Amino acid sequence: MSCANEGDFSLTTNLDTADDTGQSKPARTSRRGRELFYRHTPTIRLTHWVNVLCIAILVMSGLQIFNAHPRLYWGDTGNEGDPAIFEIYAEEQLEGPPIGWTKIGNSVFNTTGVLGVFTDVDGFLSGRAFPYWVTLPSVQNLA
């Protein structure tokens, strides 16, 4: 059983218009004759890019916070005595450069150059979870 007859209303999904001859043509075309589709207004596009920028800033500042204490704990409390579920750290060597390590649960991975040890702005090796160029602010200053 239908509430409305087929002819009572119609939904059109295209933006075709009829010209003087009665033939349909696209509502907007580019200079090359291609049909243009405007899916979002400029305001919507602008607000989405502002959101992308805000999320990027939040992620970069969160990575800097993680650099201050590069361990994540599981449970009600998290302190130096509890085992970390995720940890990034650098290990000094007697000879040679330090090694970066990433620990997930009981598994440990050598991540030198990717996580844990980086060449800092001054050109020296730095033991930090994430590099200076991906964090905001780029310097570690907890004062």
Image: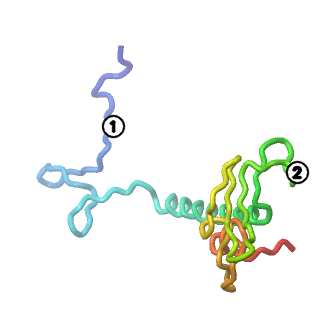
Q: Is residue 124 left or right of residue 3?
A: right
- Assign the C terminus to one quadrant of the image: bottom right
- Asked if the residues shown at circle 1 and circle 2 are in contact, with their CB atoms under 8 angstroms apart, the answer is no
Residue under the point 33% across and 31% down: 9
Residue where numbered disc 2 is placed = 81
Q: Which label was assigned to residue 69?
A: none
Q: Which of the 4 quarters of the picture holds residue 71? A: bottom right
Residue type at mark 1 is Leu
Label of residue 11 in the image: 1
Residue at the image position 67 percent from the left and 83 percent from the top: 121
Q: Amino acid at mark 2?
A: Gly
Q: How many marks?
A: 2
The quarter holding residue 100 reads: bottom right
Residue at image position (32%, 28%) is 8
Name the residue: 71% across, 60% down. 88
Residue 99, x across and y down, in percent: 68, 68
